[in-house]
Image (spheres, rainbow, N blue to C red):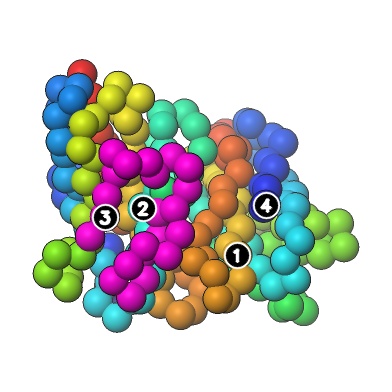
Amino acid sequence: EPEVTQTPSHQVTQMGQEVILRCVPISNHLYFYWYRQILGQKVEFLVSFYNNEISEKSEIFDDQFSVERPDGSNFTLKIRSTKLEDSAMYFCATTSAYNEQFFGPGTRLTVL
Amino acid sequence: AQKITQTQPGMFVQEKEAVTLDCTYDTSDQSYGLFWYKQPSSGEMIFLIYQGSYDEQNATEGRYSLNFQKARKSANLVISASQLGDSAMYFCAMRRPSGSARQLTFGSGTQLTVLP
């Protein structure tokens, strides 16, 4: 069964450093998303990506965040200068034109 | 704006019993989708079941069924014959209609514990 993969599974970084979280979507899917889940809280939408551009973003997704699909397969989330409050689980999700939204296993980001 | 409310932060159920997890939603869209996801302690998000707003029948997937009451704006998840492996956090989510970015809005979740 096809699945979304994410790397790394866990990233530890110092405050102020840049991090790049990577996702490989399911190959025929058209819509890509990043979500964030702070420990013990609900899952929050960050950004959606369709047709090689951002289609929608939440207020969380400020200028410190960016997304791109550099090589037509990977889908990345970059945080330019990490803050303590960026510590969370980051999920990539993808969907075709149909119903189910497939989630990757997540990357746990810890900012020290 | 869309909103999902899960009023049960924690639920307990005896193994082999059925349990209902509540979810209410608020939206001005006529077309929308409702989802339930399971998040075990390992952290991944596992899709369980989907209900479209225009679907006339309640969705079912194995031991999972969705009790969809459109007029009451509720989409409760029913798990029949609970198993120890069902112990997890359960999230209800709503998706905006086609033509939008289709992202999900999640509720705060319900922690289900199945007792032996």
Cα separation between marks 2 and 1: 16 Å
Which image quadrant for residue A39? top left
- Does B28 sit above or below residue A27? above
Magenta segment boundaries in residue numbering: A47-68
Q: Nearer the viewer, residue B47 or A41?
A: A41
- Frontmost of labels 3 and 2 is 3
Query: For mark 4, what is the residue?
Result: B1
Chain letter belonging to callout 1: B
Give the position of the C terminus of chain B as an image quadrant. Answer: top right
Contact, mark 3 vs mark 2 (Cβ under 8 Å): yes
Amino acid, disc 4: Ala
Contact, mark 4 vs mark 2 (Cβ under 8 Å): no
The local crowd at label 4, few if under 14, some if 14 to 19, many if 20 or more residues have their Cα within 10 Å, is: few
Which image quadrant for residue A50? bottom left
The answer to whether any part of residue B43 appears in the image is no
Cα separation between marks 3 and 4: 24 Å
